[in-house]
Image (tube, rainbow, N blue to C red):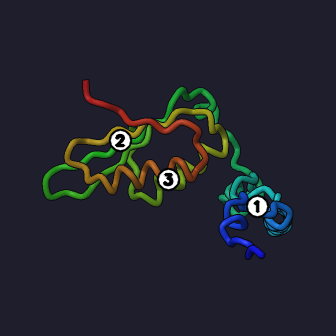
Amino acid sequence: MRCPSTYARQSRALEVPMTPMIDVVFMLMIFFVWTSTFQIPEFILPSSLLNDLQGTGQPPEPDPEVLDLEQVVVRLLASEGQPVRWLINDAPVASLDVVRQRLLVLAAIRTDLPVIVDADDIVPLGSVIDVYDAARVAGFEQVQFAVAQ
């Protein structure tokens, strides 16, 4: 009588049952769908917090000359050993906080105005970025940098 060979059993193709793998994939898919959120992130939603600039709850009254503006030019001037000075449309501004406040007031009236940041060569980059950030936070859609010709 002949003994069964183990070689015959090993020569068959190895079959992997697919049903448990498909079950695991569906379980993972259900887990990820249940744990995900389908809400709009809060930072995208519009906010009216910036409209309360004067504490009255009303947006500021638009100036007729602000309505006629074609662009807002913020110049940063500096000289050796002197601090940075700011000009908004050729009007001197005392500090960066005042620049932020004026940009907020202008943005409450018109956000479609282009803001042009024009800095001298020796102005520190941090000051330029502060003005750029202030314009973006105010809500202006176009913030551009002036270049020397």
Residue identified by numbered label 3 = 134
Is mark 1 in CB contact (under 8 Å) with mark 3?
A: no
- Is residue 45 found left or right of 72 in the rendered image? right
User: In the orientation shown, which residue stands out farthest toward the left?
Assistant: 80
Rounded to the nearest whole Å, what is the CA distance between mark 1 and mark 3?
65 Å
- Which is in the foreground here, disc 2 or disc 1? 1
Q: Which image quarter holds the N terminus?
A: bottom right
Residue identified by numbered label 2 = 75
Q: Residues within 10 Å of mark 3 (few under 14, many from 20)?
A: many
Q: Position of residue 55 (x, y in %)?
A: 70, 64
**34, above or below 134, in the image:** below
Q: Which mark is residue 90?
A: none
Q: Residues within 10 Å of mark 1 (few under 14, many from 20)?
A: few
Is mark 2 in CB contact (under 8 Å) with mark 1?
A: no
Residue kind at label 2, given as amino acid type: Arg
Residue identified by numbered label 1 = 15
Tell me what residue is drawn at x 20 percent, y 47 percent.
Answer: 122
Which sits earlier in the primary sequence, circle 2 or circle 1?
1
**54, above or below 67, in the image:** below
- Which is in the foreground here, disc 3 or disc 2? 3
Q: Is residue 102 visible?
A: yes
Which sits earlier in the primary sequence, circle 3 or circle 2?
2
- Which is in the foreground here, disc 1 or disc 3? 1
Which sits earlier in the primary sequence, circle 1 or circle 3?
1
Tell me what residue is drawn at x 58 percent, y 50 percent.
Answer: 138
Front in this rendered view, residue 3 or 48: 3
Tell me what residue is drawn at x 39 percent, y 52 percent.
Answer: 129
